[in-house]
Image (cartoon, helix red, strand yellow):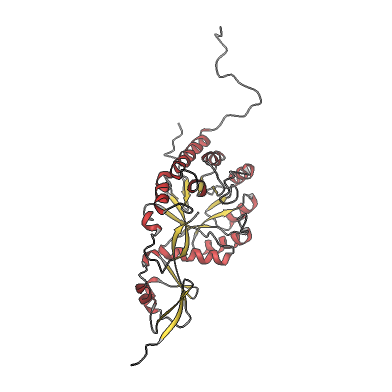
Amino acid sequence: MVSLNKDKFIIAGRNFKSRLIVGTGKYKSMSQCARAVKLSGASIVTVAVRRVNITDKKKALLMDYIDPKKITYLPNTAGCFNSKDALRTLRLAREIGGWKLVKLEVLGDKKNLFPEMIETLKSTEVLSREGFKVMVYCNDDPLMAKRLENAGACAIMPLAAPIGSGLGILNKINVKIIRKQTKLPLIIDAGLGQASDATIAMELGCDGVLVNTAIAKAKKPLDMALAFKNAVIAGRQSYLSGRIQKNLMGSASSPLKGII
Amino acid sequence: MKKIKKIKIKINGSFKFVKDNTNLSDLLKTLKIPLKKVAIELNQEIVDKKKLNKRILKNNDKIEIVHFIGGG
C-alpha cells in the first residue's frame, strides 16, 4: 500500500508535513485567516512585508494569530515589479527574524500579474549567492524553469493561471514537462479556483500547491480550506498509486464467465 | 530658556520632528515598536537591531519599519 507517511515533502533540506501551502491575504479578518490556515493543515504560509502602522499600534499583528514557531512563514515579494525592490524586501524579511527560506515573485504587468522572468532570474542568482533558499514563482515555461534551477532556486513554482484568477491549470503539458526535467520541488502557485484543481496539480506529479484566493474568497473559506487539504492528499495518493491507461473502448468490470 | 533643537525625519512615509541627538533605539521605544517582529531601514540600509542605540538620527533621515502581514 502507498504510505503517505513515508512520502516526504522536502524543501531546502527541511521536511514539511503538508504539501499544501496557503497564502494569508484577502481574508475578512485575521482570526478567519488563522482558522482557515489551521483547517488547511498547512505547514507553510506565505506572508508579505509591509510598513508597520506607526499611528495605530493597537492594530492586530499577524504573528499574534499565526505563531511562526509552529508554522513556517514564507516571506514573499508580492507587489515588487523589479529585482531591486524584491531584493530589498527579502533582505528586510530575513532581518525580521532570520528567514532564509523565501518566495521570490517579481511581477511584470499590473493587470495580468504575470511574472517578469528576466528580473526574476537575476534576483534568484543574487539571493542564492547571499545564502537565501529561494522558492521561485515563475511562468509555466520549461526552459525558464531550467534556468532558475541552474541559478540556484530551491523550488520551482509555476503559475497555473494568473494570480487570483481561479482559472485552474491552463497548461498541463508544460507542467508535466517541467516535472520530467527537474528533481527540485515543483509547486503550483497561483490561479487555482477549486479543490479539484489542486488534485489535478498533484496528479500531474507536482510536489505541492500554493493557494490563497481560492480559499480566502470562497463563500465558506473554512470549508474550502478543508476541501483543499483533502484534495491535495487525494491527488498525491492518486499520483503515487499509478493510474490506469486510457483506452478508447470500454472494458467490462464484471467477469463474463458464468453469465446467465 | 534654551530652545531644544529638533530635526525632521521621515518614518514610513510620514514626517516627524524629534529631538536632536535622538538615536534609533530611543525612537523605536517611543513608538512602542515590538523589535522582535520588525526590520528597520535607515536611508535604505538595513540596521542591525542590536546596534540601534549607536545610530544617531540626522536631519532628513528616512526610516522604514516593516513587519509581516497577510499575503499570498
Which of A99 and A200 lies nearest the eye of the viewer?
A200
- Looking at the rendering, in which quadrant would you find the N terminus of chain A? top left
Left or right, residue A54 beside residue A145: left
Which residue is the extreme one toward the top? A260
Q: Report the label total.
A: 0
Which residue is the extreme one toward the right? A248
Vertical placement of residue B50 versus A60, above or below = below
Q: Position of residue A61 (x, y in %)?
A: 39, 60
Q: Position of residue B3 (x, y in %)?
A: 37, 90
Q: Quadrant of residue A249?
A: top right
Q: Determine the residue positioned at 50% across, 73% down.
A: B44
Q: Position of residue A3 (x, y in %)?
A: 44, 35
Vertical placement of residue A236 versus A95, above or below = above
Q: Determine the residue positioned at 45% across, 63% down.
A: A94
Left or right, residue B51 beside residue A175: left
Which of A185 and A107 lies nearest the eye of the viewer?
A107
Which residue is the extreme one toward the bottom? B1
Which of A189 and A166 lies nearest the eye of the viewer?
A166
Q: Position of residue A223 (x, y in %)?
A: 44, 41
- Looking at the rendering, in which quadrant would you find the C terminus of chain A? top right
